[in-house]
Image (cartoon, rainbow, N blue to C red):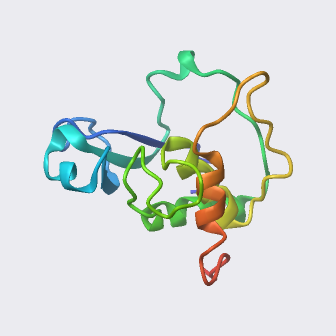
Amino acid sequence: MAGVPHVIEMGPVWQPGLSGHPSTLVGPVGARWLGHSALFRYEVRCWPHGTIPDVGEAVASPQLLSRDERRAQKVLTLVPEVPALTWGRDERRVGEMWNSNSLISWLLVTSGVGLADVRLPAGGRAPGWRAGVAIARTRRDPHPSG
């Protein structure tokens, strides 16, 4: 997969398979018991040469955090291991809710990319970011071989 751009996104399930992209995990939205309905589930998707439909709504431009291809591959390998926590809740009691920002910070910390060069949106914030960082740091082996 070297040199092949990938998209990782978290979005609503609505209908299984509707996105046309493979889902690596599915989690509940709002309350764990609501996750029994597709209306209250999200999925995490990862695919090569992808685009994000609402990228025009992004607060800031993408950031290059590393040119290390092994690290990038590690991020992709970890996508199926993301915890399927309830979106919008603080199930792990880390002080912030779990959401798409949590997904990205979890992947960066767990893969070892690190956060030193990450610039959060100017004049804004990234709700859920700290949740992903805190949850990733509780893993027993934050940099598993592979």
Horizontal and vertical percent for residue 4? Answer: 58, 47
Residue 59 % position (x, y): 65, 21
Q: Residue furthest top?
A: 56
Going 50% across and 48% down the picture, which residue do you hit? Answer: 97
Q: Position of residue 101 (x, y in %)?
A: 57, 43
- In this rendering, position of residue 107 left or right of residue 86: right
Q: Quadrant of the N terminus?
A: bottom right
Residue found at x 79% / y 43%: 118
Residue 74 appears in the figure: no
User: Can the viewer see residue 71?
Assistant: yes
Q: 132 or 1, which is in the foreground?
A: 132
- 59 and 55: which one is in front? 59
The image quadrant of residue 58 is top right
Q: Residue at x 19, y 55 (%)?
A: 33
Outermost residue to the right: 116
Q: Nearer the viewer, residue 4 or 125?
A: 125
Quadrant hosting residue 94: bottom right
> How many discs mark residues in the rendered view?
0
Quarter of the figure that contains the C terminus: bottom right
Q: Where does the image place residue 88, in percent across and percent down from the top left?
A: 42, 43
What residue is rendered at 73% in x and 66% in y?
A: 112
Q: Quadrant of residue 13?
A: top left
Q: Nearer the viewer, residue 95 or 145?
A: 95
